[in-house]
Amino acid sequence: MTELTYKIEVFEGPLDLLLSLIHKNKVDICDIPINEIFSQYMEYLDEMKRMDMDIAGEFIVMASELMLIKSKMLLPRPEENGEDPRAALAAALMEYKCIKEISEKLDEYQKQYEGRFVKETDEIPPDVDYVCPHSVNLLKSAMLRMLERRAVENMQKPDNVRPIIKRKIVPVASKISGIITSLEKNGKMHFDLFFTAVTSRSDLVATFMAVLELLKINRIIIHETENTHLDPSDIIVELNCA
């Protein structure tokens, strides 16, 4: 008949064993029933001896400390010196418990992140060779000529007496949508055609802002004809299909 063998739990040290016994017995660390815990502690050591396991010296030292605490608990304590013999042990157990919980949390983090690598941030130098495909001077000159041609100063101005909330607000988003729709319908268009229906300075500015926004997001492209006097009618606008 094969002899049965048993495996007992292995603890990292005497404090680990005591903490386990306290947890199993569901007792307060600050109010340890020393007789009960000491008996179970010695049972564990006896089991280790019976299974021919090497007992570390620290376990023996703790056993002697528990026996000393047990003997002190049996002696009457003077009222003026009412220090609990278990106080030092309770403090050590509390500190060990805190360290163990932190260690378990760190171990959890290690298992979660040990296979990851952090890549250093790459410093991307600015591209000094990049040249913007759209000329700022081209747009600026075209806008100035547009203002001159349409005599913006003589356009209908909002009544300064009326509250500002009643003034017409021209949303740039609607102008963007209108420009895209016109280009999808007509293909290439002259720059000045987008301003044929403007009736106020706000309308003109919103239309120009819409053109700038579409250029910014690279949705449209502009280029000039062979004429070099930068008339708005000489600027061609088309959708960027790239």
Image (cartoon, rainbow, N blue to C red):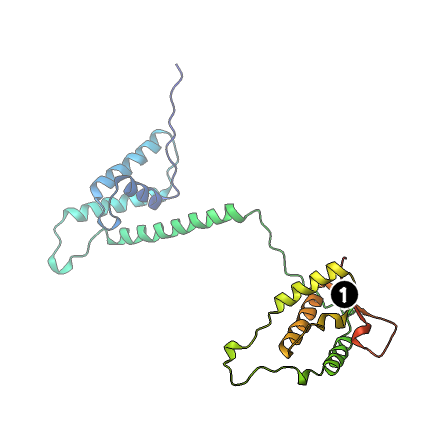
Image x and y of residue 94, in percent: 31, 52
Is residue 64 rendered to the left or right of residue 220? left
Question: Is residue 97 something one can see in this rendering?
Answer: yes
Image x and y of residue 106, in percent: 46, 50
Disc 1 residue type? Ile
Q: In which quarter of the image is residue 205?
A: bottom right
172 or 159, which lies in front? 159
Image x and y of residue 146, in percent: 74, 79
Is residue 173 rendered to the left or right of residue 86? right
Task: Identify the residue shown where x is 43% and y is 49%.
Answer: 105
Q: In which quarter of the image is residue 132?
A: bottom right
Task: Identify the residue shown where x is 24% and y is 51%.
Answer: 30
Task: Identify the residue shown where x is 36% and y is 43%.
Answer: 57
The quadrant in which the N terminus is found is top left
76 or 226, which lies in front? 226
Q: In which quarter of the image is residue 14?
A: top left
8 is higher (above) or lower (below) than 30? above
Q: Mark 1 points at which residue?
A: 221
Image x and y of residue 217, in percent: 69, 64
76 is higher (above) or lower (below) than 230? above
The quadrant in which the C terminus is found is bottom right
Question: Is residue 219 something one can see in this rendering?
Answer: no
Task: Identify the residue shown where x is 21% and y is 52%.
Answer: 85
* Crowdedness near tag 1: few (<14), some (14–19) or many (≥20) residues, C-alpha within 10 Å: some
